[in-house]
C-alpha cells in the first residue's frame, strides 16, 4: 500500500514541475517590433537567469500597459560586463516580437535556452524602451519580471 502512494506522489510531483516549465497563456507573436520614444532607453544592469521569460509591463504609476510589445534578440556567445544592450540591438531587427495581453502581461517559453536581450516598448511613441539581458536556462528562476516604462522625452 505504501508503494502505491509513493508512485502517485511522484507522478503528481512530476506533473507539477513540468506544468511550471510552460506558460499558462503564451504571448501572441507581433508582426511589428516595438516603438520607443528614444534610441537608448533604460537598461537593467544585471543579467537575469530565467526558465521562462514572463512578466508585466507597467507605466510609471504602476498601471499595466496593454499596448506593450516585447522584442527578443538572440545573442551569440556570453554577455560581457561592459556590453550595453541598446548598442547590441541598435539597427538590428528583433528575432521575434510578442504582444502583451490586455493586462500588460507576457509569457514566452517556447524559445530555446541561450542568451537574449529583451527590449520592451509599446506600439506607440509614448514610452522609452527598457532593455533586459536574459540567460534562458531550464534551471533558471521562474520569477516574473516587472518592467516599468518611463514616459518618452
Image: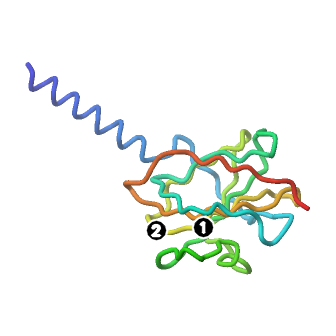
For the residue carrying disc 2, how many other residues have a C-alpha within 10 Å: few (<14), some (14-19), or many (20+)? some
Secondary structure beneath disc 2?
Answer: strand
- Number of residue marks: 2
Q: Position of residue 45 (x, y in %)?
A: 61, 63
Mark 2 → mark 1, Cα distance in angstroms: 10 Å
The residue under the point 75% across, 52% down is 68
| Residue indicated by mark 1 | 117
Please tell me the numbered disc located at residue 114. Answer: 2
For the residue carrying disc 1, how many other residues have a C-alpha within 10 Å: few (<14), some (14-19), or many (20+)? many
Coloring basis for residues: rainbow
Quarter of the rendering containing residue 94:
bottom right
Image quadrant occupied by the C terminus: bottom right
Work out whether 141 lies above or below 8.
below
Q: Position of residue 137 (x, y in %)?
A: 42, 59
Quarter of the rendering containing residue 144:
top right
Work out whether 27 lies above or below 38.
above
Relative horizontal placement of residue 17, taking residue 37 as reference (left or right):
left
Please tell me the numbered disc located at residue 130. Answer: none
Q: Position of residue 56 (x, y in %)?
A: 66, 45
Relative horizontal placement of residue 108, taking residue 64 as reference (left or right):
left
Q: Where is residue 149 in the image (x, y as percent from the top left)?
A: 77, 53
**Which sits in the foreground, 78 or 19?**
78
The residue under the point 81% across, 40% down is 61
- In the picture as drawn, the residue positioned furthest to the right comes out as 153
Work out whether 100 lies above or below 119.
above
Image quadrant occupied by the N terminus: top left
The residue under the point 74% across, 80% down is 91
**Which sits in the foreground, 17 or 80?**
80
Amino acid at each position: 500500500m505504501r508503494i502505491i502512494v509513493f508512485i502517485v506522489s511522484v507522478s503528481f510531483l512530476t506533473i507539477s514541475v513540468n506544468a511550471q516549465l510552460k506558460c499558462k497563456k503564451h504571448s501572441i507573436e507581433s508582426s511589428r517590433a516595438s516603438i520607443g520614444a528614444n534610441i537608448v532607453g533604460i537598461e537593467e544592469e544585471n543579467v537575469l537567469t530565467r526558465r521562462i521569460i514572463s512578466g508585466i509591463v507597467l507605466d510609471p504609476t504602476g498601471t499595466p500597459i496593454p499596448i506593450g510589445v516585447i522584442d527578443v534578440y538572440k545573442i551569440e556567445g556570453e554577455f560581457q560586463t561592459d556590453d550595453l544592450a541598446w548598442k547590441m540591438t541598435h539597427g538590428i531587427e528583433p528575432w521575434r516580437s510578442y504582444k502583451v495581453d490586455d493586462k500588460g502581461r507576457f509569457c514566452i517559453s517556447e524559445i530555446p535556452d541561450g542568451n537574449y536581450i529583451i527590449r520592451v516598448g509599446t506600439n506607440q511613441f509614448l514610452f522609452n524602451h527598457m532593455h533586459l539581458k536574459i540567460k534562458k536556462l531550464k534551471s533558471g528562476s521562474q520569477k516574473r519580471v516587472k518592467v516599468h516604462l518611463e514616459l518618452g522625452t
